[in-house]
Amino acid sequence: MKVYQALADALARHGVDTVFGLMGNANLLYLPAFADAGGRFVAVTHEAGAVAMADGHARMSGGIGVASVTHGPAFTNTLTSLVEAARSRSRVLLITGDPPPVPSHFHHFDIATVTAAAGAGYERVYEPASLVRDLNRALQRIVAERRPVVLNIPIAFMQAEAGEQAPVVPPVAPPTAAAPQPDTLDRALGLLTSAKRPLVLAGHGAATSGARESLIALADRIGAALATTVLAKEMFAGHPRDIGIFGSLSHGVASEVIADCDCVIAFGAGLNMWTALNGDLLRGKRIVHVDIDPARFGSYTPVDEAVAGDARLTAAAMDSLLREADHAGNRRWAEKIEQAMARHIPQADFVDRSGTDTVDIRSAMIRLDRILPARRTVVSDIGRFNVGVWPYLRVADPLHFTTMGGFGSIGLGLAGAIGAALAGNDRPVIATVGDGGFMMHLSEFTTAVREKLPIVVLVLNDGAYGAEHYKLRNHGYDPAHSAYAWPDLAALATTMGARALTVRKIEELDAVGEFVPTLDGPLLVDVRLDPDVNIVRY
């Protein structure tokens, strides 16, 4: 058996069912061998798309996403997506390889150094006989370190005899985080029991730990408001004290509750600049921060008490101790929040600014929220449009929402959505992207067409790079410098083999609901926005 055959076999025995990639000399043989063995090879149009798809696949499947590229420029083309995966702590394996061992070969590149700079781990296959051992080690590091790993398999090894290989050893997950230490828990409870107006804040870490019920029980005991970060949105949906997103995207009632609260107990939340508004939202409040990773304490916001522990276990331990102490919270505070939320209507937070041939993005998302299937996966790109999307386009489960925004690069959302659609969750995938980000990686739309993926791609199209449009005007320059005369996006999508529609009136969105049940490929919805309507402050 040759090395390329052994690699295809080892990937399959590790349970890898999908590899995203672009063929070249370094991976020319093992990709078809993997497909012949029953795996799925998804051919992309650009290497950045391969890694972003593997990233989206990993986030929604809970497994390891695998991408494959050849050497030299193919590897450097992946770097923005690789940094995004590293910043988002995604479990991604990127397989590449050194070019032929010829000193003058123009594809020579220091893969290890650049991988380290991207924040990913680096491994290599040292000899043909060590292939499986080295692959095992790379996969184990991905799981243990919670970050992507680049595996360098030199092309010179590919057609060598593999010889006797080590057995495939599946990666072992780190032990589940233990309950917190009693002394830190006691100090945290001291702050909590003295609070008159507490608020429980859940982040992505709380969602992944399955902490919803434990956090609700704790909040009910102390009469706390419930809020989430963007990456845990809708975690408390249906609870009468759920005020939604905490931070720069909070609605009117939530903003008042956040301003009034005197203690925030954050579970699995980074307390970053957007959640805390550079610390402004937490100033003057007592802060308890619970996280499994002590390195996150104080990274963005100083806290009064830091508790190292799993969100679910820590919340349950807190609730148990408070129950033993017969502690009861401030019911007047709790009732005030419940009454305010019972009266809250999302549309009341803003004045619709739809134009003659454009729609208000907030109204559009509220309407789509009702039209689209409730059980859906939403994958978001980054851009000004998010202010109108994240608060209003909901999900039934926070683990079915993600944003390709760990590095702040626009353009990765479409590829991330393609990866998510292939993760096998049996939910329609909704991709929300800006027009600039969509055009950056327009070519990957053809990947969705080839794979017949029923993705709804919402292009929030203001005909400009929206943030820059506003900032230019603010600085006294002509915002037309940021404007782009794109071709007709619906016509482009139709030419590529997809279904498409253009929306200039809010009622035209209703057609999306008619398309979705029969989708056998992507649907592009070109939602026209006015670039001069700005709903975010900079």
Image (cartoon, rainbow, N blue to C red):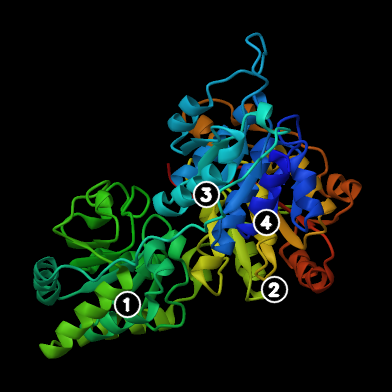
User: Closest to the observer: 520 or 45?
Assistant: 45
At label 4, counting other C-alpha atoms closer than 10 Å, the crowd grade (few under 14, some 14-19, many 20 or more) is: some
State the mark number for residue 215. 1
Look at the image and tell me in which quarter the N terminus lies.
Answer: top right
For mark 4, give the secondary structure: helix
> Which numbered mark, 4 or 2, is in the foreground of this view?
4
For mark 1, give the secondary structure: helix
Q: Which badge, 1 or 3, comes first in the chain's sequence?
A: 3
For mark 2, give the secondary structure: helix
**Marks 1 and 2: in contact by CB < 8 Å?**
no
Q: Which residue is mark 3?
A: 136
For mark 3, give the secondary structure: helix
Q: Which residue is mark 4?
A: 12
At label 2, counting other C-alpha atoms closer than 10 Å, the crowd grade (few under 14, some 14-19, many 20 or more) is: some
> Which numbered mark, 1 or 3, is in the foreground of this view?
3
Q: Which badge, 4 or 3, comes first in the chain's sequence?
A: 4
Is 108 left, or right, of 232 in this rendering?
right
CA distance for labels 1 and 3: 37 Å
* Amino acid found under the numbered disc labelled 2: Ile
Is 442 left, or right, of 347 in this rendering?
right
Q: Which badge, 2 or 3, comes first in the chain's sequence?
A: 3
Residue 381: percent from left, percent from top: 59, 49
Q: Which residue is mark 2?
A: 371
Question: Could you tell me which residue is drawn at 83 percent across and 56 percent down?
Answer: 500
CA distance for labels 4 and 3: 13 Å
Question: Could you tell me which residue is drawn at 67 percent across and 48 percent down?
Answer: 415
